[in-house]
Image: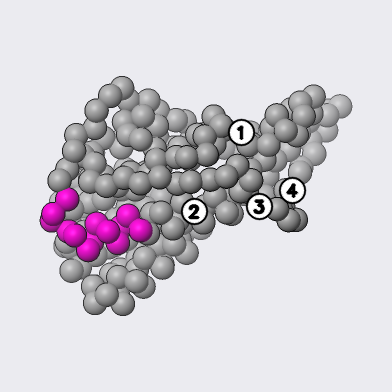
């Protein structure tokens, strides 16, 4: 089959996992192409949209027999941005991950497959992304292997939405304990969105690394 994998940010954390997916598909004798701009997608059997922040245009989606997104929430709950991070902040260590058909609406398509990302509560950002990336690859390979046999299911229930996270979302409260804010420390990106706090009018950056567990 001819397959495209789109990641619309070449610096995204998911790029290494998208490369693994592409290389694995090629190993299985598929024609797989990793691209970083939706205009590079051509006629194909499947187009995977991984970690994309912009909606894909309808004329681009018309090029694929199936257009697929993988999203870590139990849709329709948790549509939108950074759903895994938001759910970790809510105290969840078992997070659903869903593979569904892309539509013009945000995270509204029919569901083909689902699984769970299992955390133990000690993982930091890189470890969390590793588990999310692995689960994403597994769902995509399953979909390709059994392409055309999955029964699509309509999303059922109330839709909820998460907002986009930015640098200010990594701000700590100096008057709270580390334990109270540990889940926030788990999800911060030391390079792009480091944890910080303001004290006596000055901002201080905190970098977190795991020594042992």
Identity of the residue drawn at 35% across and 46% down: 115
Residue at mark 4: 207
Q: Label 1's element?
A: helix
Mark closer to the chain start, 3 or 4: 3
Residue at mark 2: 131
Residue at mark 3: 191
Q: Give the spatial CA distance, label 1 vs label 4.
A: 15 Å
Q: Residue 37, how many percent across, how many down?
A: 35, 58
Residue at mark 1: 169
Give the magenta range: 138-150
Is residue 19 located in the magenta-colored stretch of the structure?
no
Q: Residue 12, how many percent across, how many down?
A: 49, 55
- State which mark lies toward you, 3 or 4: 4
Mark closer to the chain start, 1 or 2: 2
Q: In which quarter of the view is residue 79 placed?
A: top left
Q: Give the spatial CA distance, label 2 vs label 3.
A: 20 Å
Q: Label 3's element?
A: loop
Q: Label 4's element?
A: loop
Q: Residues within 10 Å of mark 4 (few under 14, many from 20)?
A: few
Q: Give the spatial CA distance, label 1 vs label 2.
A: 22 Å
Residue 175 in sight here: yes
Identity of the residue drawn at 27% across and 47% down: 113
Q: Label 2's element?
A: helix
Specify the color scheme: one colour
Residue 13 in sight here: no
Depth check: give the residue in front, 89 or 41: 89
Q: Magenta stretch: dominant SS?
A: helix
User: Relative to residue 62, is residue 146 depicted above or below?
Assistant: below
- State which mark lies toward you, 4 or 2: 2
């Amino acid at each position: 089959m001819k397959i495209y994998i789109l990641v619309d940010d070449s610096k995204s954390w998911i790029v290494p996992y998208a490369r693994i997916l592409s290389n694995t598909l090629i190993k299985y004798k598929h024609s797989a192409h990793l691209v970083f701009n939706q205009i590079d997608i051509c006629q194909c059997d499947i187009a995977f949209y991984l970690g994309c922040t912009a909606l894909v245009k309808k004329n681009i989606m018309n090029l694929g027999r199936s257009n697929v997104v993988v999203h870590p929430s139990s849709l329709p709950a948790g549509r939108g941005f950074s759903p895994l991070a938001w759910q970790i902040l809510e105290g969840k260590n078992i997070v659903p991950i869903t593979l569904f058909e892309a539509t013009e609406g945000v995270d509204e398509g029919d569901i083909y497959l689902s699984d769970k990302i299992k955390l133990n509560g000690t993982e930091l950002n890189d470890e969390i992304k590793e588990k999310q990336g692995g689960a994403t690859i597994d769902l995509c390979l399953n979909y390709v292997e059994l392409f055309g046999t999955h029964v699509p299911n309509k999303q059922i229930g109330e839709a909820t939405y998460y907002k986009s996270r930015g640098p200010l979302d990594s701000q700590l409260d100096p008057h709270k304990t580390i334990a109270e804010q540990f889940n926030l420390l788990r999800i911060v990106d030391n390079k792009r969105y480091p944890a910080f706090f303001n004290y006596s009018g000055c901002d201080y950056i905190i970098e977190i690394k795991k020594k042992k567990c």
